[in-house]
C-alpha cells in the first residue's frame, strides 16, 4: 500500500492532469499557460515541473507505462497463441487500459483523445510516440516469435494494425459521439487488419 507521501504525490499529479484538460477544453490548448494549470491544481509552477516538463507531457503522461505493459504482454503469449491472436489481445487490453486509468474520469479520457487527434502540436507528438511504440513492439514481437516471424514480418504486422486503427479513428472522428464509439471504431479497424495477418500463423 502506498505511503502518505506517495499518495499525496499521486493526488497532486492527478490534480494537474485534470486541471490541464479542463483548461484545454475551456480555453484551448495553445492558449493555456503552465501557470494556469498549476493554479488550477492549487500548486506552484515550480511544483508543476516536478511532475511534467511541458503541457505536452501532461497529455501523454502514461505513454512510457503503457509501452512497458504492451511489451510485457507481447513477450509472454499464452501457449499456442498465434502472432495475430496476440496482437488482437493487445488491442483489447490497450482499450481496457485506456478506460481504467485512475488519473482520468471517463469525460477526461474522451477529451484527451480528441485533443490528441485534433490539436496540431499534439498530433505531431503522437506521430513521434506512435513510431517509437510501433518499432519497440515490432522488435518484441519478433523476439517472441523468433524463428517464425522475420523482423520485416513483425514490423509489417504491427504497422498495419496500428495504422489501420489510427486512420479509421481519425476518419470517423466527426461521426463518433462517445469514447465507446471511438473504441468500437478502433476494434473494428483492428479486426479488419488482423484478418489479413492470419497467414502469419
Image: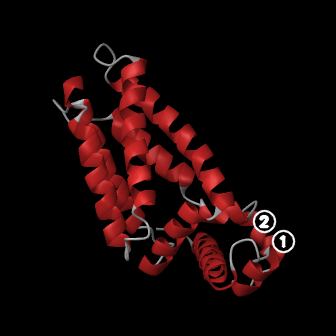
In the depicted structure, whether residue 32 falls above or below residue 191: below
Residue 163, above or below 18: above
Residue 45 position, x and y percent, is: 82, 75
Labelled disc at residue 46: 1
Q: Foreground residue, 153 or 92?
A: 153
Q: Foreground residue, 102 or 152?
A: 152
- For the question of whether residue 2 can be seen, the reply is no
Residue 200 left/right relative to 158: left
Question: What residue is pinned by disc 2?
Answer: 49
Question: Residue 126, position in %: x, y?
Answer: 58, 52
Work out which quarter of the rendered image holds the C terminus and state it.
top left
Q: Quadrant of residue 54?
A: bottom right
Residue 154 position by quadrant:
top left
Tell which of 159 and 54 is nearer to you: 159
Q: Residue 14, image x and y in percent?
A: 58, 75
- 10 Å crowding of disc 1: few (<14), some (14-19), many (20+): few
- 15 relative position to 86: left or right: right
Count of numbered marks: 2
Q: Quadrant of residue 158?
A: top left
Specify the label residue 1 is tagged with: none
Q: Is residue 33 above or below residue 65?
A: below
Position of residue 52 relative to residue 130, above or below, is below
Q: Residue at x 43, y 35 (%)?
A: 159
Query: For the residues marked 2 and 1, what is the alpha-carbon distance in whole angstroms?
Result: 5 Å
The answer to whether the residue labelled 2 contacts the one labelled 1, judged by CB atoms less than 8 Å apart, is yes
Q: Residue at x 79, y 76 (%)?
A: 33
For mark 1, give the secondary structure: helix
Label 2 secondary element: helix
Amino acid at each position: 500500500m502506498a505511503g502518505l507521501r506517495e499518495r499525496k504525490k499521486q493526488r497532486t499529479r492527478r490534480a494537474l492532469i485534470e486541471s490541464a484538460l479542463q483548461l484545454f477544453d475551456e480555453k484551448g490548448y495553445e492558449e493555456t499557460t503552465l501557470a494556469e494549470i498549476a493554479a488550477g491544481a492549487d500548486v506552484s509552477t515550480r511544483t508543476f515541473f516536478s511532475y511534467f516538463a511541458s503541457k505536452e507531457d501532461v497529455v501523454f503522461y502514461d505513454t512510457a507505462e503503457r509501452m512497458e505493459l504492451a511489451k510485457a504482454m507481447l513477450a509472454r503469449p499464452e501457449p499456442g497463441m498465434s502472432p495475430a491472436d496476440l496482437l488482437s489481445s493487445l488491442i483489447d487490453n490497450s482499450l481496457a487500459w485506456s478506460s481504467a486509468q485512475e488519473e482520468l474520469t471517463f469525460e477526461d479520457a474522451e477529451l484527451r483523445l480528441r485533443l490528441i487527434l485534433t490539436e496540431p502540436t499534439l498530433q505531431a507528438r503522437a506521430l513521434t510516440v506512435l513510431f517509437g511504440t510501433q518499432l519497440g513492439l515490432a522488435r518484441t514481437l519478433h523476439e517472441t516469435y523468433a524463428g517464425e516471424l522475420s523482423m520485416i514480418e513483425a514490423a509489417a504486422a504491427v504497422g498495419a494494425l496500428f495504422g489501420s486503427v489510427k486512420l479509421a479513428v481519425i476518419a470517423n472522428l466527426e461521426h463518433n459521439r462517445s469514447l465507446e464509439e471511438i473504441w468500437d471504431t478502433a476494434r473494428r479497424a483492428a479486426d479488419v487488419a488482423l484478418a489479413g495477418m492470419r497467414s502469419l500463423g
